[in-house]
Image (spheres, coloured by chain):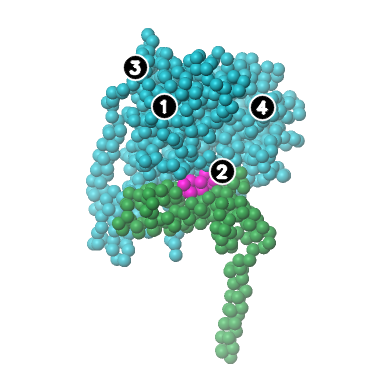
Chain colours: A green, B cyan
Amino acid sequence: MSNLNHIFIICSTIVIAMSLMPTYHCRTLKPDDLKLIEKTCNNTPIPNLCLQILKADPRSASADIPHLALIFVDVIKVKANEALIKINKLLKGSGDKQVLKSCAGAYHAILVGDVPMATQALQLGNPKFAEDAVADSSLEAMDCEEDFKGKSPLTKENTYMRDVSDVARAVIRNLL
Amino acid sequence: MIPEFEPPLGSHPIPHTLEWGSYKFCQCITHSSLHNSHALCLCTQVINHNTTTILFLTMEHHKPLLPTSSESEGCPSPNPRTRKDKGLLLVLGGFLLLSSLVAYGGYRASHLPHAHVASPTSNHDQHSSKSVPSTKWHPVSRGLSSGVSEKSSTVSFATSQPFPWDNSMLSWQRTAFHFQPDKNWMNDPNGPLYYKGWYHFFYQYNPNGAVWGDIVWGHAVSRDMIHWLHLPLAMVADQWYDKNGVWTGSATILADGQIMMLYTGSTNESVQVQNLAYPADPSDPLLVDWIKYPGNPVLVPPPGIGVKDFRDPTTAWLTPEGKWRITIGSKLNKTGIALVYDTVDFKTYELKEGLLRAVPTTGMWECVDFFPVSKENVNGLDTSTNGAGVKHVMKVSLDDDRHDYYSIGTYDENNVLFTPDDAKNDVGVGLRYDYGIFYASKTFYDQNKARRILWGWIGESDSEYADVAKGWASVQSIPRTVKLDTKTGSNLLQWPVAEVESLRLRSDEFKNLKAKPGSVVSLDIETATQLDIVAEFEIDKESLEKTVESNEEYTCSTSGGAAQRGALGPFGLLVLADDGLSESNPVYFYVTKGSNGNLKTSFCSDQSRSSEANDVRKQILGSVVPVLKGEKFSLRILVDHSIVESFAQGGRTCVTSRVYPTKAIYGAARLFMFNNATEATVTASLKIWQMNSAFIHPFHPDQKN
């Protein structure tokens, strides 16, 4: 009898887990969502990057443009964090400490300035401040890159930050 | 797994801990002795059982001051203050000594002898300047054409400096006589008014940081719109209907002296609504405390209008029926519109059918302003004035491009319609108040001196990195009088209020200074960071006649700035320049002779070489300016550290810019006159005043008189 109980419990657990899985892992977007995402991404400088980011985020389903833009702002936040961690590591090595510290300041500004400003601006419907913020985050990354004068250990991070910011900016322009 | 972290904005209580990346800031102390609030933090990181201790100066510098490594210290104990205090004090003392040395270096008082120096004199004609061949003029890069924090594009200067900002340079940027709070972010001017002997100024303010967000109403008062005293915040986000932001609004003063303040609230659900507030104590001339009407909100977005497209109510004016009328900007798709409401008590409103004006492709209309100007005399008019001798001005701030546009036309008060005089100069597509940084502007009628006064928000054009480091962002323009240009009839004139002249200290005068083509003349004045400059220029008649007509179309923003030479220009002044001219901000006229023989003049402010820093905007700002027959080329420039306000032809064209030099600061800043034309000789007369500080500071009770 206890065996049957065990089997029952295990089976129901599996069934429940399987029924929950699609809602969590399911990334198939509804046709209308996809249309908005594709239309929006086609008007950005890097449509592929735009699509890749939005399709990977479940929140893009039935999101309006401000919420699509917020997804990019989240990516900016995560990537700025990652860049800072890498910079801290590089600071222990033999790289140009002064430039690295300036880059840290740039990414710090993205985190404490641009990200909160863009987030609040998009949530509250004052999109010009969101555009200003992501325009800045793009330039901060490029300043950091330029400062290494060709010998940058952060090219991947800086280029990605610039690209995501430029895409975010194009998305936000739809609101202005 | 990326650690989640959210560095808090602004200053922090003592002591506190911060997460910064993988560092744990063991202890931060806020030091008021250092410029702006920032914290000195001793932080420790443990990686692979090795402990590294680093001293950081946060919110201003992010360079480790003293990297030390200690393996004997484990994770910090909760209160290691006493043992580490002495060490911190020593370091702090060392840093203070260092920064005072840097500041002293910047304050070099000595004059360097100049090769081509014009000395001021008031009695006799000037000796002519020697010409300097224009080898100093390098081709300049053009900044990107839009967006904040523009940086130099592909052409990089050999001397271009990455992130050069130190405390000395950043401190210098604070203005001496423009309104700005002690720290943090400011944007739109709100509810300006004159009441019981005091000018009041309210403003959008973020108490938590140097970026837009968490907006509340700041407040300041002044006897003369120049010497401001900071008061406590007038309104904070303490109601559901403004929980997400106490946004922009305007004041209406009723006939009996009551003040009705209408403002936009962003509700707890991010809906934009209009609310009413009024002074708690009308007998308090300082209007310190405000009451929000218990029945708020008084207006919610009407059907068909987006809940986030409904903000910035105007001052009210009287209708033929004796009701009060306001307008609120919005948009329908990409058409900017102005909604109109009538009210008798500012509590209940009637939405009027139709729109005051609508213009396709302009997008959202923010900070709409609507006011009369006199056709006949120079005085300002109360907002309700209408009639034969009156034109109306409708102004909008365009969300899309962050510029303020105005249109002159007629107001049909019965049909509630504004019609522009010239369709080319319709609302949002025609003339701008200012061709530089100038947004969310707002006028009010100053009944004290019968003037219409204009306030404009001047944002930053540097990087967020610098704003976070210096701990503040934005200033306001010097208030300007606004009136109709009766000579042209088709534009407004703006001019700094006369009260700013009370700051004038000693002056230097230069009469009939001749500058041959391709010359730079050093103007021997004491210091050059706080100036009021008035100048007139003339081009020699021979060049004017000889110069061939051309089809050349000159636009400041697409030109090569002061380095692009034409027959009859550019000529003007180099402000905030250093001795070697590695940094300078030319403000100039560029004259062309059209195919009909008529002269066309542009007035530009050229930031392209204004700083060796690469994280500041470097555009050439400006516009054409009408110069009428018989008029000389005249300009006025207010230089106040990182803001330069320029006015041409008595305020027909205005250009405000933000300038962030790294070298041309403190005693190293100079003023030059220049003529980079190829043919014209230019004769200039100038008067230059040193400007005192306005000493803007918090109000103390004994200052009521």
Residue underneath mark 1: B574
Residue underneath mark 3: B119
Contact (Cβ within 8 Å) of mark 4 with mark 1 = no
Within 10 Å of disc 4 (Cα), the crowding (few <14, some 14-19, many 20+) is many
Pointers 2 and 4 within a single chain: no
Quarter of the image for the N terminus of chain B: give it. bottom left
Q: Residue at x 29, y 66 (%)?
A: B49
Within 10 Å of disc 1 (Cα), the crowding (few <14, some 14-19, many 20+) is many
The answer to whether residue B425 is magenta is no
Helix, strand or loop at label 4? It is strand
The answer for how far apart the CA atoms under marks 4 and 3 are is 53 Å
Tell me which label, 4 or 3, sits earlier in the chain. Answer: 3
Name, please, the residue furthest toward the top. Answer: B123
Q: Which residues are magenta?
A: A124-139
Pointers 4 and 1 within a single chain: yes
Q: Could you tell me if residue B258 is visible in this image?
A: no
Residue underneath mark 4: B317
Contact (Cβ within 8 Å) of mark 3 with mark 2 = no
Amino acid type indicated by mark 3: Ser
Pointer 2 indicates a residue of which chain?
A
Which label sits in the foreground, 2 or 1? 1
Within 10 Å of disc 2 (Cα), the crowding (few <14, some 14-19, many 20+) is many
The answer for how far apart the CA atoms under marks 3 and 1 are is 17 Å
Residue underneath mark 2: A128
Q: How many marks?
A: 4
Whole-percent x, y for residue B301 in the image: 68, 43
Amino acid type indicated by mark 4: Trp
